Amino acid sequence: MTNYLFKPEKVVETDLIIQNYCQSIKPTDKKYRELASSYCNNLAVPPGALGQLEKTYQKIYGIGRGKVNVDKPGVLVYVSDNGICESGVSSNPVSTTYQVGKNMLEGRAIINLLTKQTGSKLEVVDIGCLTDISEQCEFKVGYSTKNFDKEPAMSRLEAGRALIAGINKTEEIIKQGWNIVGTGEMGVGNTTTSAAVITLLLDSELEEVIGLGAGLNEEGVRRKQKILQKALVYHQPFKDGMDVARKVGGYDILAIAGTFIACSKHQVPCVVDGVISMAGLLVALTFSEAVLDYTFVSHVSMEPGYQLAIKKLGLEPLFHFEMRLGEGSGCPFFFQFIQTACYTIQNMSSFKEAGLNIKDYVDVRDKY
C-alpha cells in the first residue's frame, strides 16, 4: 500500500495529502478512444450496431491507454452509521447497519451472492459503524457521524481521514490486482446524507433530489425534507466539496470519494452503484474533474437525486432494474457486461476477414 498517513493529526496535513495526491490524476488521452473507435468501425457489423458494447470498449481502451484489463473485478463496501438517524429520517433501526455489515462478512447478504455468481472480489470495510463488525477495523474513522440536524456531521480532520482511508484501501486492492472497482456501502440514514450532498454539489432544489430511501411513508418523507431544509440553511456557508461532506455527509460517502480518486490516479475504471456512491463521485469531482474519465455507472437507481446527477453529468447507466438496494449490488452486473463487451469486440472479424464490404452499409448512428 502506498505510504500515506492513515490518520493525520492536523487538518492542514489531510488537506495537503489529498491535494498532492489529486494533482497526479491525469485525464485519459483522446487518441486512444479514437483508435478504439476506428477499430470498432472496421468490425463486420453495421456501423454502430453494437451500441453500448462499442462505447464501453472504447472508454476502457482509453483508460488503459491501449490495454484492456477487466478480468479481476471487485466491489468495495464501506459500512458506516449516521448521526442524523437520531432525528427520525429512517424507518430502520440503527442496529441494521451492524447486522447487514456482519451478514456481508459472513456471506449472507445480497452482494455476497452477486459477487460470487459473477466471480468478483468483495471487501467489506468498517469505516464508521457504531459497533465494530469485526476485530479488524484498521480503516475506521469513528463510531458514527454526529447528528447534522444539530451540529456538523464531522470535523474537517475526520472528513479528511475518511477520504484518505478510501484512498488507502483502494491502493491496497489495486496492489492486489483488482483492475476494475465497484463502489458500495451500507448505513442506515445514508440516503439522507446523500440527498444533502447531491443537492448542494449540483446546486439543485431539495425537492428534485429527496427520495424514499429504504422505505418511508408520506409522513417520514415530509420529516426528512423538513430536517434537510433546515440543515442546508443552518450549515451555510459551504467552502468546498469537503466542507459539504463534513457538515451534512457521511464517512461512507467520503471513503467512496477516496476510491474514485485512487482509481483515477492509477487509471483503473471505477463503477457507480446507487445514490450514495453517486454522492461520493460528486465529492471526488470537486477535487479533480478528470475522475469522470474513469467512471462508469451500472444501473439507474430509483432515487431521484441519482437520476438528476446522471443527467447533469452526462452519464449513461446500462441497466434499469428498478433496484434501490445499495451494497454495490449494481456493480457485478456491470462487470459481466464489460467483460462480455471487451471479449466480443476483441474477437470479432473485420469486414475483410468476414468477406463483407463496408461500402454496402449505411452509417445511421446519428439518426437514432
Image (cartoon, grey):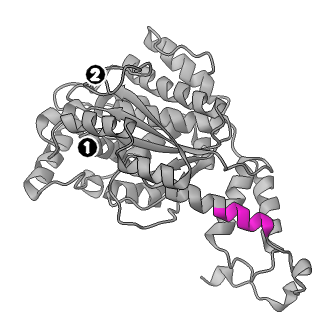
Could you say which quadrant of the image residue 247 lies in? top left
Whether residue 240 can be seen here = no
What element does badge 1 sit on?
helix
Q: Which corner quadrant holds the N terminus? A: top right
The one nearer the camera, 55 or 104, is 104
Q: Which residues are magenta?
A: 340-347
Residue at image location 50% in from the left, 37% down from the top: 284
* Residue annotated with mark 1: 192
Q: Residue furthest top?
A: 9
The structure residue drawn at horizontal position 22% and vertical position 39%, both measured from the top left corner, is 96
Q: Foreground mark, 1 or 2? A: 2
Q: Where is mark 2, residue-wise?
A: 143
Q: On the rendered image, what quadrant is the C terminus found in? A: bottom right
Identify whether 344 is placed above or below 60.
below
Q: Callout 2: helix, strand or loop?
A: loop
In the image, what residue type sits under mark 2?
Answer: Tyr
The label on residue 64 is none
